[in-house]
């Protein structure tokens, strides 16, 4: 936990993808909890909403905005080096940057899939690789926002879920290795969250249905079900509370879901040895 002593240097957390949604809320919440928060984003011209939220919460002095593009190794390295040069330490990293994607493989290209993997998986790998030496020095935390889609494969989310599954496998494998040097690894798994993440998928529904061919009925059913799910979505602030819990806990779990709905959904898969219970759920999304 961050020190509350007035003479102590506050702990520093670097959070990616903070221009909106969970990342923005997490940056503000971490600052409220006493962390000095380095809030990063690919395009810093989009920082106004974060700065306003920080000012409204009274924590503008604990948040600094820096550019970091998780798909650009040079950008990652430059940001990390600048943080170390200015603050001398890095106590926690929150991998939050990511991008949604809707599609099915027969109707898209391998290049489309590679692009999804680049931001959602390799971006996490790049940030982890660049920051682990510094987290080891501080015996810090590596926290990554994945998704319930990193545990349960979901229709028309093949590339996205593949990337999130990869993140889960990567970090579950890394966790015991990192722990031998004092670094704690945690996966935060949101379900539906009311944020710009969904809007940023940029699905033109009429065009998508027209192009879907034999998959049009299934796609229509999936889109209708998803719209209903997001109508009752969790707020970004509620989801961000789980990230702060992972920052603050003495021994955070490997997996932390952000809501009861997310816990129930993930539990279906984790106790489903033959996969039948999972398919019983997801088949109903498209049938």
Image (cartoon, rainbow, N blue to C red):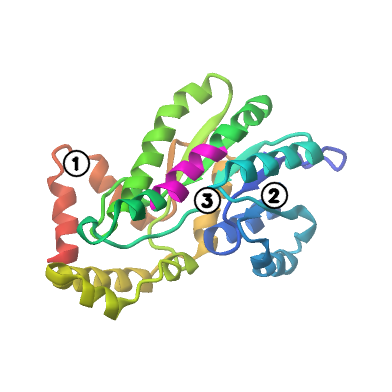
Look at the image and say whether residue 45 sits in the magenta stretch.
Answer: no
Residue 45 higher or lower than 114, as above or below: below
- Image position of 279 (left or right of 158): left
Judging by the rendered image, the residue that carries numbered circle 2 is 38
Residue 272, numbered circle: 1
Q: Residues within 10 Å of mark 3 (few under 14, many from 20)?
A: many
Work out how far the residue at label 2 is from the one at label 3, CA to CA, in angstroms: 13 Å
Helix, strand or loop under label 1: loop
Q: Residues within 10 Å of mark 2 (few under 14, many from 20)?
A: many
Quadrant assignment for the N terminus = top right
Q: Quadrant of residue 73?
A: top right
Residue under the image location 69 percent in, 44 percent down: 79
- Residue 18 point in image, percent of width and height: 60, 58
Sequence-first disc among 1 and 3: 3
Residue 96, numbered circle: 3
What is the magenta range? Answer: 116-127
Sequence-first disc among 2 and 3: 2
Q: How many badges with numbers are in the image?
A: 3
Can you tell which of label 1 and label 2 is closer to the viewer? 2
- Image position of 74 (left or right of 95): right
- Residue 149 point in image, percent of width and height: 33, 51
Helix, strand or loop under label 3: loop
Work out how far the residue at label 1 is from the one at label 2, CA to CA, in angstroms: 39 Å
Residue under the image location 71 percent in, 63 percent down: 54
Q: Kindly report the secondary structure that dominates the magenta region of the rendered protein.
A: helix
- Residue 210 point in image, percent of width and height: 21, 77
Sequence-first disc among 1 and 2: 2
Helix, strand or loop under label 2: strand
Residue under the image location 40 percent in, 47 percent down: 117
């Amino acid at each position: 936990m961050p020190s509350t002593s007035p003479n102590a240097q506050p702990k520093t957390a670097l959070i990616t993808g903070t221009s909106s949604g969970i990342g923005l809320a997490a940056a503000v919440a971490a600052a409220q909890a006493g962390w000095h928060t380095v809030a990063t984003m690919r395009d810093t011209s989009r920082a106004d909403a974060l700065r306003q939220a920080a000012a409204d919460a009274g924590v503008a002095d604990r948040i600094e905005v820096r550019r970091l593009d998780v798909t650009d190794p040079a950008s990652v390295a430059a940001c990390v080096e600048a943080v170390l040069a200015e603050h001398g330490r890095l106590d926690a990293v929150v991998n939050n940057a990511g991008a949604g994607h809707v599609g099915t493989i027969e109707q898209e290209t391998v290049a489309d899939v590679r692009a999804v993997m680049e931001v959602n998986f390799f971006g996490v790998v790049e940030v982890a690789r660049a920051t682990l030496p510094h987290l080891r020095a501080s015996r810090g935390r590596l926290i990554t926002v994945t998704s319930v889609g990193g545990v349960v494969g979901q229709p028309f989310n093949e590339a996205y879920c593949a990337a999130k599954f990869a993140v889960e496998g990567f970090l579950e494998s890394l966790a015991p290795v990192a722990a031998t040097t004092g670094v704690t690894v945690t996966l935060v798994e949101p379900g539906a969250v009311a944020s710009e993440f969904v809007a940023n998928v940029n699905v033109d529904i009429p065009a998508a249905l027209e192009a879907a061919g034999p998959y049009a009925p299934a796609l229509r059913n999936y889109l209708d079900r998803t719209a209903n799910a997001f109508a009752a979505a969790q707020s970004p602030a509620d989801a961000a509370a789980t990230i702060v819990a992972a920052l603050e806990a003495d021994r955070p779990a490997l997996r932390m879901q952000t809501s009861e709905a997310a816990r129930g959904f993930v539990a279906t898969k984790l106790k489903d040895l033959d996969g039948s219970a999972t398919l019983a759920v997801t088949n109903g999304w498209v049938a």
